[in-house]
Amino acid sequence: MNNELARKLGSTDPRERLDAARHLAEHADAKQIGLIEGALALETVAWVSSALKRALQRARPTDSATPGPERVELSSDQTAQIYSDALETTAKQIIHEIEPILGALRLSAETEMANFEGSDTKRGLERMEALVAGLARLRQAASAPKLEDFALSQCIFAWIAEEVGQKPLGVLRAGPQETVVEGDKGLVCLAFVNGLRNAIDATLALPIEEERYPEITVNWGTTDIDVWIAIVDAGVGFRGSLLRAFEIGSTTKAGHLGMGLATAQQAMTSLGGSVRLIPGERGVRFEMRWPKAVA
């Protein structure tokens, strides 16, 4: 077992290292302290480091003379990873249980109902399917990052084109061209697309005549320490509590599931980054950041 754990901890794939670290966080003993400390000294990915630190706490023997259990103070990184682990596991189980049931219900309804296409049953099923799809995106956002170099500017152009499509609004692309960054492209896409969709919805909700909607501005760049993207709209603005905006199920829009901002935040948390909403006099600035080197 130790040989396999050592192999995984030395892998170039952070997912393998995370798998081994999570196992040790649950099962480590004093004999594995050296293995854990060696891996922790070399680890550069926040998720894996956090799991290894928990494993080290588990492996180190406690003092039996201590009169009672001491409260263990967890770092923000450790707390975030524990939450993400639970979120990923729970979402996976829910999806596994619900998907086949939904598939069977849709098949039965399509064959047994003469007017299925226009029925409330179909609309209810579609909402449930959207919920499962939202959970799948949330689970993806909670997964360990797979780091790679990618052309951020090219990806942003492609994501904007896909989301805007034929909608009657424009997007000003204000960032530098040929910007290559390191990160998990899938997680960055999840966060960006959810931010852009909110900006589009807020803009299209304006009472505008002749569809002359204000432009959405997308800007991006890098600093000495991080990569950032900002989406600024002049839409209807944000209504509600900023503290609750990122909670799962929190939404001010009718017919929405309230997973978009929660998914965006979780995606950036997985990269060691953050998401902020900054309300303005008109509209909102959605800002996402992640470190250049995940540490």
Image: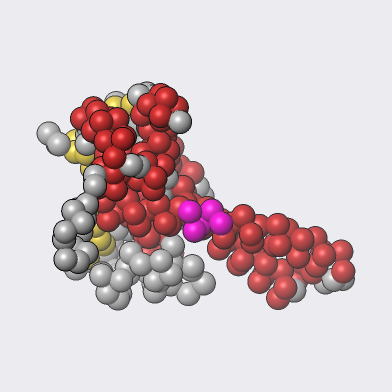
Q: How many marks?
A: 0
234 vs 29: above or below: below
Whether residue 259 appears in this view of the structure is: yes
Q: Inspect the magenta stretch and tell me whether residue 92 lies in it.
A: yes
Give the prevailing secondary structure in the magenta stretch: helix
Residue appearing at x 41%, y 42% in the figure: 23
In front: 248, or 35? Answer: 35
Residue appearing at x 25%, y 69% in the figure: 242
State which quarter of the image contains the N terminus: top left
Q: Residue furthest left?
A: 224
40 vs 116: above or below: above
In front: 50, or 286? Answer: 50
Residue 45 horizontal/vertical position (percent): 28, 35
Residue 166 horizontal/vertical position (percent): 51, 50
Residue appearing at x 35%, y 42% in the figure: 28
Q: In this image, 75 relative to 109: left or right?
A: left
Residue 284 horizontal/vertical position (percent): 26, 62
Whether residue 216 appears in this view of the structure is: no
Which colouring convention does the figure follow? Answer: secondary structure
Q: Inspect the magenta stretch and tell me whether residue 245 lies in it.
A: no
Q: In this image, 8 relative to 34: left or right?
A: right
Task: Determine the image quadrant of residue 145.
Answer: top left
In front: 291, or 123? Answer: 291
71 vs 85: above or below: below
266 vs 39: above or below: below
Residue appearing at x 27%, y 56% in the figure: 79
State which quarter of the image contains the C terminus: top left
Span shown in magenta: 89-93
Residue 207 horizontal/vertical position (percent): 39, 72
